[in-house]
Every structure is written in C-alpha cells, then in structure tokens.
Amino acid sequence: MPDVTPDVVTALAAASGQGPGALLRILLLASMVGAALLAWLLLRGYRSNGGDDSNND
C-alpha cells in the first residue's frame, strides 16, 4: 500500500494558501438559498384562498 500522507499534506498546504474563498462561496450560496426559502415561507402566508375572499367573517 503506497504512503499517500505526503500527497495529502502537500494538497492541504496548497489549499490553505488560497485563502477563505471556497468557504465564503459556500456561505454566500447557503445564505442566498436560506433567504429565498424564508421569503417563500413568508409570502405564501399572504396568498389568498383561491381568490375567494368573501368567506372572511
């Protein structure tokens, strides 16, 4: 079995030198999906019941 530890260490060192770009992209995408889901949940409560508002007592 070949020893892949040096390859993993080299890959991690190269990735850490690139900065927080990947993490920030993931956080930005997750926040956009969360905002869209929150907007959908809030706005569906304002939807009328089939357009018939005459039964509101």
Image: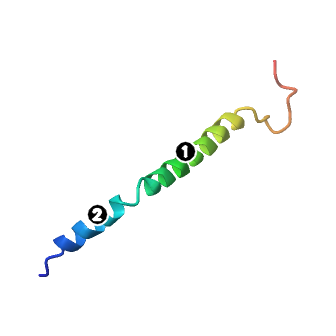
Residue occupying image coordinates x 35% and y 63%: 15
Image height check: is 15 above or below 47?
A: below
Relative horizontal placement of residue 40, taking residue 11 as reference (left or right): right
Image height check: is 23 above or below 48?
A: below
Q: Position of residue 40 (x, y in %)?
A: 66, 41
Instruction: Using the rendered view, name the quadrant where residue 45 is placed.
Output: top right
Amino acid type for the residue under numbered disc 2: Ala
Q: Where the C terminus falls, by quadrant?
A: top right
Q: Which residue is mark 1?
A: 31
Front position among marks 2 and 1 = 2
Coloring applied to the structure:
rainbow
Q: Position of residue 55 (x, y in %)?
A: 83, 25
Q: Secondary structure at mark 1?
A: helix
Residue occupying image coordinates x 29% and y 68%: 11
Q: Which residue is mark 2?
A: 13
Amino acid type for the residue under numbered disc 1: Ser
Residue occupying image coordinates x 60% and y 41%: 35
Instruction: Please name whichever residue, 8 or 26, is drawn nearer the observer in this view of the structure.
Output: 8
Instruction: Using the rendered view, name the quadrant where residue 46 is placed.
Output: top right
